């Protein structure tokens, strides 16, 4: 892993540097179980730059001279072309390289609490901070947990305070691609049902939401013959998701990865328009069945049964048509 040199002492003192957030309830998000939620944030309306507004005003002023038809077409063009691809100053490979250099293997921490995980990551030389606030969306009401934040070497300690204020929303896009490149957040909570972990990060240079989720699953070993995908698609809020489970001997691990366009998530001051592929990603894993595999398997079986019934009905209709044609031929 990178950035370990000279950071072990810093990591040891990280717990003291990380502030304690006592108002947990105002931070906690309700109704974020399964795939029926929009990942924290959304509803952000992009602003117009002043020069665009001035130009639109000028076009309106000369509309009578140029003709309404031409002016309307030009206004429509300027409004629609708002994605600024020049915002992205890194590549997808650079983002993945930075993330992979420090990414924890989540399955290794199932069964541990946040304090034990923090100690392990700190001993590995990572620049991690431990927050005592509860950020988990664990559906187990008995669970309690903490958040571990990893900051890359380019990030300042002040950026931890910024993150604590509103996650990624108080950073501009340049900070996210430079000082915060490779940063990630890890929520670990334990309850009567078992351990539940959430891992989240941003990749503004992602090729697509689907590709980003697949890359993360591969990095976490959630692939191959022992991995079983139960469901995938897009929920009613526009989030892309994949859900499944992994078997290792007698153990079963359950997971769900979900992603949304970071431009939809972001509610900060940077009004530039990101490509829709810029991704905010969250992966959840647990050693207990939080995804409700029985319900998903039943739904899959029902869907297959419905398709089979529909096919049988189509075949029967085709047979009836053929019989009718044979009867007509015989009459002729």
Image (cartoon, rainbow, N blue to C red):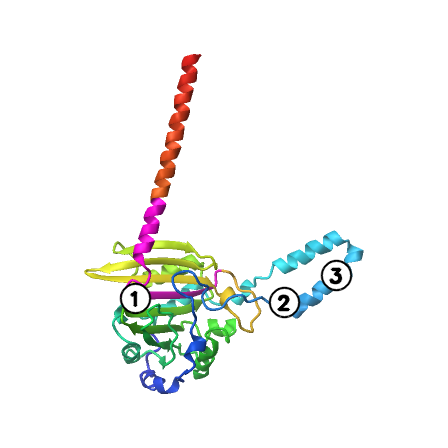
Spatial CA distance of label 1 from label 3 is 57 Å
N-terminal of the two: label 2 or label 1? 2
Q: Which mark is residue 142?
A: none
Rate crowding at label 3 as few (under 14), some (14 to 19) or many (20 or more) other CA atoms within 10 Å.
some
- Quarter of the rendering containing residue 66: bottom right
Q: Tell me the residue at 39%/66% (across/down).
A: 282
Residue corresponding to mark 2:
48
Residue interval drawn in magenta: 277-304
The secondary structure type at the circle numbered 3 is helix
Q: Is residue 219 above or below residue 170?
A: above
Q: How many labels were placed on the picture?
A: 3
In front of the other: label 2 or label 1? 1
User: Looking at the image, can residue 94 be seen?
Assistant: no
The answer to whether the residues at label 2 and label 1 have Cβ atoms under 8 Å apart is no
Quadrant in the picture for the N terminus: bottom left
Answer left or right for 67 relative to 201. right
The answer to whether the residues at label 1 and label 3 have Cβ atoms under 8 Å apart is no
Q: Residue furthest left?
A: 250
N-terminal of the two: label 3 or label 2? 2
The secondary structure type at the circle numbered 2 is loop
Residue 206 horizontal/vertical position (percent):
44, 62
Residue 14 horizontal/vertical position (percent):
35, 84
Residue corresponding to mark 3:
60
Q: Tell me the residue at 43%/83% (across/down).
A: 157
Residue corresponding to mark 1:
286
Q: Nearer the viewer, residue 316 or 164?
A: 316
Spatial CA distance of label 3 from label 2 is 16 Å
Rate crowding at label 2 as few (under 14), some (14 to 19) or many (20 or more) other CA atoms within 10 Å.
few
Q: Nearer the viewer, residue 241 or 152?
A: 241
Spatial CA distance of label 2 from label 1 is 43 Å
Q: Residue furthest front?
A: 141
Q: Nearer the viewer, residue 2 or 128?
A: 128
């Amino acid at each position: 892993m990178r950035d370990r040199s000279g950071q072990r002492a810093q990591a040891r003192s990280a717990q003291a540097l990380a502030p304690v957030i006592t108002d947990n309830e105002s931070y906690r998000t309700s109704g974020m179980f399964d795939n029926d939620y929009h990942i924290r944030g959304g509803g952000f309306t992009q602003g117009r730059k002043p020069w665009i507004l001035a130009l639109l005003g000028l076009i309106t002023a000369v509309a009578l001279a140029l003709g309404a038809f031409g002016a309307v077409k030009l206004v429509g063009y300027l409004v629609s072309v708002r994605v600024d691809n020049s915002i992205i100053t890194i590549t997808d490979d650079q983002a993945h390289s930075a993330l992979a250099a420090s990414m924890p293997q989540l399955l290794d921490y199932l069964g541990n609490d946040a304090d034990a995980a923090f100690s392990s990551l700190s001993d590995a030389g990572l620049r991690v901070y431990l927050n005592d606030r509860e950020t988990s969306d664990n559906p187990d009401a008995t669970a309690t947990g903490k958040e571990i934040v990893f900051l890359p070497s380019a990030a300042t300690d002040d950026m931890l305070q910024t993150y604590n204020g509103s996650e990624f929303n108080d950073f501009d896009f340049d900070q996210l691609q430079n000082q915060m490149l490779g940063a990630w957040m890890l929520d670990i909570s334990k309850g009567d049902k078992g351990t539940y972990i959430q891992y989240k990060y941003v990749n503004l240079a992602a090729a697509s939401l689907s590709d980003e989720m697949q890359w993360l699953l591969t990095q976490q070993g959630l692939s191959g013959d022992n991995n079983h995908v139960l469901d995938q698609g897009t929920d009613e809020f526009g989030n892309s998701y994949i859900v499944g489970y992994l078997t290792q001997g007698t153990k079963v691990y359950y997971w769900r990865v979900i992603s949304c366009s970071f431009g939809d998530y972001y509610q900060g001051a940077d009004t530039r328009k990101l490509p829709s592929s810029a991704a905010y990603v969250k992966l959840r894993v647990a050693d207990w069945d939080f995804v409700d595999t029985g319900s998903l398997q039943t739904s899959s079986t029902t869907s297959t049964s419905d398709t089979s019934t529909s096919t049988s009905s189509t075949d029967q209709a085709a047979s009836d048509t053929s019989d009718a044609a044979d009867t007509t031929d015989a009459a002729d």
